[in-house]
Image (cartoon, helix red, strand yellow):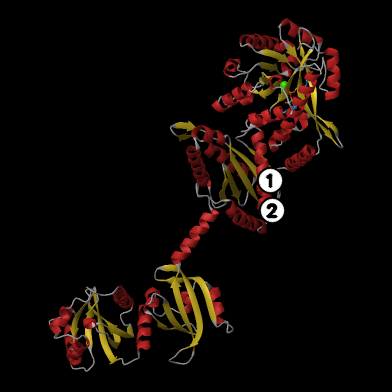
Amino acid sequence: MKLEISLAKDAAVLAQRLCELERLQHPVWVFDLDNARILWSNESSLQVWQADSKEELLSRKMGTDMSVSVSERLNQYKTDFARDETAQFNEIWTMYPNGEPVTLNVVFSAYRLSPDRLCMFCEGVTEKAAGAETLRSSEALLHTSVHISLYSSAGTPLYRNPASRNVVSSATNKLQDHFVNPDLLRQLENPAEDEIQAITSVNTVNGVVWHDITARRCLDAVSGEAAWLISEVDVSKLKATEEHAQFLAEHDTLTKLPNRNYVSIYFQQQIDNVLTAGKSGGLLFIDLDNFKNVNDSLGHDAGDQLLVEVADRLRSLEKSQYSIARLGGDEFLLLINPIVSEQHLESIMQQIINVVSVPIILQGREVQVTPSIGVALFPDNGTQILDLMRHADLAMYHAKEAGKNDFAYFSKELSDAAESKMNLVSELRSALKGDQFETYFQPRVEVSSNSIVGAEALVRWNHPTLGQVQPGNFITACEESGLISELGKVVFKDAVVAQRIWAELGHDIRISVNLSPLQFNEEHLVDELLDIVKEHRGNPKKIELEITESVLLGHDRCTIDKLHRLVECGFEIAIDDFGTGYSNLAYLHRYPISCLKIDRSFINSMDSATPIIELIVSMAKLFDLYVVAEGVETPEQLEMLHKFYCQEYQGYLFHKPTDFKSFTALMSQHCNIAA
Ligand code: C2E
Ligand code: CA
Ligand code: CA
């Protein structure tokens, strides 16, 4: 016994005990858990281990070909003993000395060699002569990763397999200590339940984890009393994957902020809570001003970077009473729960404006974006998240229309206006189907001869109950709803048909048609216009397209190319309402334009605008453009145009816009056939 056991404090006592054990009939050995070696054995265990001598047995390195499950089991004994040195386990073990299975019923207990060294005392009680089935099932129970345990109906532990022992913080833990969710315990107490299955959180040495458990009512084989047999599998990883999937479904991948799905569930819950507490709150709809410009000019990556930065800045404001979400694009929501006072709310909005407006460097350039914010209050403006979002959105649009970088409150008037706009759009839609639009024509007159040389096509809506409605009341709604594209084509077709018929009557005048910016930007505009011209046998050389200066603003290649294609097809291009937009005469030579229409406002305020009119006319001559003065109402105005050699005019002085039939009659009186 030259063993390390002699290191133990009470070595003498142990030596004495070992001598007694030496004489025992059943095998006894001491196992070094740290080094996986036998430190001592009695004679009869030599047989079990099929060893020639004690020296040979003690020299065996058991760790070298040890299976993972056995080594895990040994580690676990170590943990078990570290927790409770008085613990004892009686288990059926199968060992494989020289590859042959030897099955023993072994009692394992701890023995401390030194303060930091623990070994295991193993005592083979009876050699098992059990059947193969029993041997395999007990092996399976020992080595499985499934946690199997038996509890009395009062919740006291009766048995735990190693996997189960491995995770409990104390061997005496009851079932009540194990489950985090008290509902499950209540279910177990219900005598009607025989089997319960659940995925639930449980307390373990590693903290709270998720287990998939099956609890089955049974009888304890020893006492015959009612018991619960519980098997558990750790599903924490699966649960984490599921939670991650859930996170992805409810969050925006770019900014990691909650998304629309999240908002519809959790924002509603928060609103409900505030309302139940008798308080009030606010929902802010935040939209970035001119975000599209950043995307268009610096690219989508820069746009994304900007959104992430804005999200972080908004997050930096997030306190326990705010929740932030991104709805998509450059739209964010902020829920304030609860609102203490109006000043409180407005100070939050001011903070948002302040943090968002701080310039950010994107691709080496300093970019500044500002927010427009719409507010809906609850319960005043609604209690349902979808209503509040709609209302806050409407208020945000109002803030944008009022000049951006500011906030606006939702009001009944806003929603009434929005509602009547919606009604208008649906009426316009059916008006298009029902042919309620009619194209009127206003003469364009040569200043020198006072004869009709052209006409502008102007749409009218023959409303079934309201009578004739002027375009000022519906063109904007058509543009906002996209209907302008269809309406524009109807007017264009009418213009082409009128031009052909009048030419056939000998009045081959030029007809101008208004093209809204939205129409101009349509991808297939040129082909569509050509198709209409072909179908109605029109002459594109006698059709002029009126565009506004805003179309030219971008100075981009696409615009220039499209204008050239239109001109190549024979159309002429006029700039409408000239002078009201950016009025940069210098850029005009870049575009294939043939006509400028001076806006009515200049003709109206003739005295103050005279120098401007004179300048426009003389510049236009320089660029070889002809000039049309719009809105001429008095002979004095016409006189001035004479003086400046302005070529054409249009106005009530000569004639108001009129229908096709009246215009045809008008031409027979005034038209210069040679035009
Ligand atoms: P616009 O293109 O500037 O058309 C000229 C407007 O001035 C017409 O108003 C015409 O009736 C009006 N006008 C002409 N002479 C005088 C005058 O001496 N005094 C006054 N006070 N007004 C005069 P209208 O027809 O009400 O059209 C308003 C606007 O609606 C048009 O302004 C144009 O921007 C738009 N619009 C009309 N028809 C169409 C269309 O088919 N397509 C598009 N996209 N816009 C259209
Ligand atoms: Ca026009
Ligand atoms: Ca005009």
Up-down: is 669 above or below 400?
above
Is 644 placed left or right of 523 in the picture? right
Q: What is the number of callouts on the image? A: 2
Mark yes or no: residue 153 visible.
Answer: no
- Residue 125, how many percent across, how many down? 28, 91
* Local secondary structure at mark 1: helix
Image quarter where the N terminus lies is: bottom left
Is residue 82 visible from the viewing direction of this image? yes
Name which residue lies at 83% across and 13% down.
670
Graded by Cα atoms within 10 Å as few (under 14), some (14 to 19) or many (20 or more), the crowding at tag 1 reads many
Q: Which quadrant of the view contains residue 620?
A: top right
Q: Nearer the viewer, residue 17 or 397?
A: 397
- Residue for badge 1: 391
SS type, badge 2: loop
Disc with the residue nearer the chain's start (2 vs 1): 2
Classify residue 17 as left or right of residue 84: left
Image coordinates of residue 100 in percent, x first then y, are 24, 84
Foreground residue, 458 or 352? Answer: 458
Q: Residue beneath label 2, please?
A: 383
Three-letter amino acid code at the position of disc 1: His
Quarter occupied by the C terminus? top right
Q: Amino acid at mark 2?
A: Thr
In the drawing, does residue 122 fall left or right of residue 409?
Answer: left
Where's ligand 1: which quadrant? top right
Image: 80 above or below 285 = below
671 relative to 149, above or below: above
- What residue is at 56 percent from the left and 49 percent from the top? 325
Q: Residues within 10 Å of mark 2 (few under 14, many from 20)?
A: some
> Does the Cβ of the disc 1 residue fall within 8 Å of ligand 1?
no
